[in-house]
């Protein structure tokens, strides 16, 4: 290693370079290898101010590998023949077994077919998993995003800004629950509110006369009728409306029977 470094430094000095650059063509690259060269290159460039030290070390490492193959191999073969040396693989192993004694699969026609069968099975399994992931990717993304929002109105917590923040986000993104496909049904809204709320929804969406046609019904019948009446009106409850979009809809002129623009806030 010392000889490598001395030769490298003297060679660098002979070419008019910083002698310390010769270390990159010495033991750092020839003994340490590529990993050691990459590890020391930043130090040589930033601390010692030797530009392109990494390229110099990698080039020296490549030259060393080529020299080992073209020069070291023939010299080693010549010395082995001259001194009648044998490789250790020709002798009996003291530990383990010889490769010829180990059971191994034969490369024949049936072995190739079996390998192709397992390869196709792995490809089909991977394609199926990829298709399932693609189908659920957007749903999983929407679920993860929804977990970051909390817009529950809590009567006991009057200082919470959760709903206001959700309204701001909905306004910026122009969220609209009606155009997103939300409709009032028995399961998601109508059966969960009292009768007066159902009548208010029908009145707001379709007018007082329509609401009067169902005000005599019991809760179950009123829920079924209201679900049919509100199906294509675009009406959504107050908590699901975006305040900014709602105010724009209220400012529009009334040219006749109107259907309130339903907007939403997460």
Image (cartoon, rainbow, N blue to C red):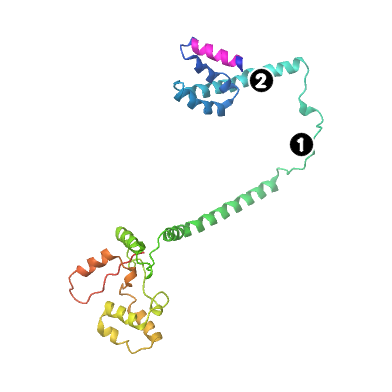
Which residue extends farthest top? 14
The residue that mark 2 highlights is 73
Image x and y of residue 143, in percent? 44, 61
Vertical side of 33 occupied by 202: above or below: below
**In the image, what residue occupies the spot 50% across and 17% down?**
20
The residues tagged by marks 2 and 1 sit, at their Cα atoms, a distance apart of 25 Å
Image x and y of residue 61, in percent? 56, 23
Image x and y of residue 235, in percent? 31, 73
Vertical side of 47 occupied by 153: above or below: below
- Is residue 251 left or right of 108 when viewed as pictured? left
Q: Quadrant of residue 161?
A: bottom left
| Residue 95 belongs to magenta span | no
Q: Residues within 10 Å of mark 2 (few under 14, many from 20)?
A: few
- From the image, give the main secondary structure of the stretch colored magenta: helix
Residue situated in front as seen by the camera: 185 or 101: 185
The residue that mark 1 highlights is 99
- Is residue 246 left or right of 153 when viewed as pictured? left
Q: Quadrant of residue 191?
A: bottom left
- Is residue 69 left or right of 247 when viewed as pictured? right
**In the image, what residue occupies the spot 30% across and 75% down?**
233
**In the image, what residue occupies the spot 45% across and 25% down?**
46
- Is residue 215 left or right of 69 when viewed as pictured? left
Residue situated in front as seen by the camera: 101 or 139: 139
């Amino acid at each position: 290693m010392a000889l490598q470094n001395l030769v490298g430094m003297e060679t660098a000095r002979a070419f008019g370079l910083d002698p310390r650059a010769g270390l990159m063509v010495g033991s750092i690259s020839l003994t340490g290898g590529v990993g050691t060269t990459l590890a020391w290159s930043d130090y040589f460039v930033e601390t010692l101010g030797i530009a392109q030290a990494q390229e110099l070390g990698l080039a020296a490492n490549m030259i060393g590998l080529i020299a080992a193959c073209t020069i070291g191999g023939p010299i080693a073969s010549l010395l082995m023949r001259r001194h009648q040396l044998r490789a250790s693989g020709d002798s009996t192993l003291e530990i383990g077994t010889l490769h010829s004694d180990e059971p191994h699969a034969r490369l024949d026609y049936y072995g190739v077919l079996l390998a192709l069968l397992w390869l196709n099975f792995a490809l089909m399994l991977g394609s199926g998993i990829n298709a399932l992931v693609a189908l659920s990717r957007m749903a999983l993304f929407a679920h993860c995003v929804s977990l970051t929002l909390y817009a529950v109105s809590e009567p006991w917590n009057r200082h919470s800004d959760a709903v206001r923040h959700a309204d701001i986000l909905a306004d910026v993104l122009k969220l609209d629950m009606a155009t997103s496909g939300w409709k009032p049904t028995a399961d998601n809204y109508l059966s969960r509110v009292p009768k007066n709320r159902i009548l208010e929804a029908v009145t707001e969406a379709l007018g007082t006369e329509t609401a009067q046609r169902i005000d005599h019904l019991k809760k179950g019948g009123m829920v079924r009728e209201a679900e049919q009446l509100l199906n294509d009106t675009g009406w959504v409850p107050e908590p699901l409306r975006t305040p900014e979009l709602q105010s724009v809809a209220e400012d529009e002129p009334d040219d006749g029977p109107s259907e309130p623009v339903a907007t939403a806030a997460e």
